[in-house]
Image (spheres, helix red, strand yellow):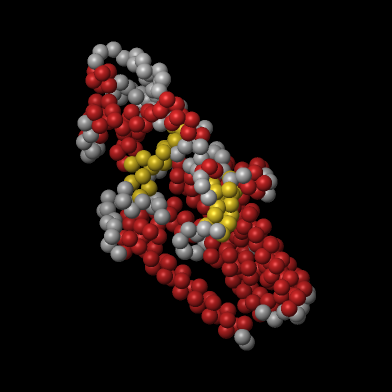
Amino acid sequence: MNVPLSGSPSQAATAWQPSLVAGTQIGPARWDGEQVLTDASVQGQQRILRIGLRERMVLDLVNGSRTVSEISEELAGQGMPLPPQAVAGVLHKLMMFGMIDRPFTVAAAAVDVLDSRAHIGSTTRTGVWAPAANGFSRFAPTRWSIDALTTTPVLGIALALAVASAVVMVIAAPSVLLTVVHPQSAAWFVTAFLVAIVWNIGVTVVHEAAHVGTFRALAGRPAHLSITRFGIIPMLNTQLDGLGLLSRSRRARVVAVGPIVSLCLALVPLSLFFFAPEGSFLRYISGAAVLVDLIVIALAVSFFPNTDGTRFLEVLSSVDQLQSVAFLTLLRRRKLPRGLPRFTRILVRVYPVLLAGTVISFLLASVWAIRLALL
């Protein structure tokens, strides 16, 4: 390596004024139950670095004019005393990963390997069948519609339609259930639910494609629909590398747009159910589709782990894996630092109550549906 700095190595390190690589992206801080983490990357790269609080505070002070010693002094003033040698160590690590401008000519195989992996994302992970993304992407909304969904007026209209759809679905639930549990024949029942399941698979594809398309539009990063193996069970999934780089409001939009689209699409079978003649097969088949949509959407917006509802809470609270953090905190296996924002601490404490309420609500709804069906 050729270091274009004069003097001894220690003097060179002290005089070094590090600067961020053009296109550096640093996301908001999050709590994972043990430490404060931040996602960081460089625009155009798929590699996402997950850095701790110390690295984040160092990065925030790198501006191309501060020396290592000055950064150390600033950190001490912020309550994190870090000697210049430790600051230089953090900078060297980030420099190796290409986030800090390298003040030397690199001629090391190890650094070349790191650089070659800068364009590797989740599509290469074991258990993810990413080639399916290219095929599924054809079902995604067009570029125009994706951009439109990210604008506040269009998203507001879609949200209003989604709320109206949810209200109508709840009001219509008794009538839908009574219609579906009294088929004209077994053939009606089997055919209707096969069609309803196929319809809901299509809704799920568009739901996930909405997550992907909104993320692409807001983050400017590649994202894919894919098939993820959960043991031997294939599951439709979305690969959103770099979601943690977005602001809280943009992450909330990416998470919320899926259920919003699902609820808007539910207006199709709802309309057919209300306008189809009483006792007709069209009314029966649309009722089955409404019932399946209602169950799937209710699960999606619930507070069960790994649902859109829980992920939305994670965005609001800035907590990774909220369910794990909440229950480990409840069991006193993890401490909840008082330095965290009050809203974050409240949501961590409240989540077990929300989950218990979700379980009770689904049990009561199941009992109500069974009793209504037996009438």
Answer whether residue 257 is visible to the viewer in this image.
no
- Residue at horizontal 29 percent and vertical 57 percent from the top: 334
- Residue at horizontal 33 percent and vertical 28 percent from the top: 92
Location of residue 373 in the rendering, given as x and y in whole percent from the top left corner: 62, 82
Q: Quadrant of residue 192?
A: bottom right
Closest to the observer, 25 or 173: 25
**Residue farthest along the bottom direction in this orientation:** 375
Viewport quadrant of the N terminus: top left
**Residue farthest along the top direction in this orientation:** 6
Q: Can you say whether 127 is above or below 368 in the image?
A: above
Answer whether residue 136 is visible to the viewer in this image.
yes
Q: Can you say whether 211 is above or below 164 in the image?
A: above
Question: How many numbered marks have been drawn onto this rendered protein structure?
Answer: 0
Location of residue 102 in the rendering, given as x and y in whole percent from the top left corner: 39, 22
Location of residue 328 in the rendering, given as x and y in whole percent from the top left corner: 33, 60
Location of residue 199 in the rendering, given as x and y in whole percent from the top left corner: 69, 62
Closest to the observer, 167 or 11: 11
Viewport quadrant of the C terminus: bottom right
Q: Quadrant of residue 91?
A: top left
- Residue at horizontal 53 percent and vertical 42 percent from the top: 124
Closest to the observer, 36 or 4: 4
- Residue at horizontal 36 percent and vertical 51 percent from the top: 32
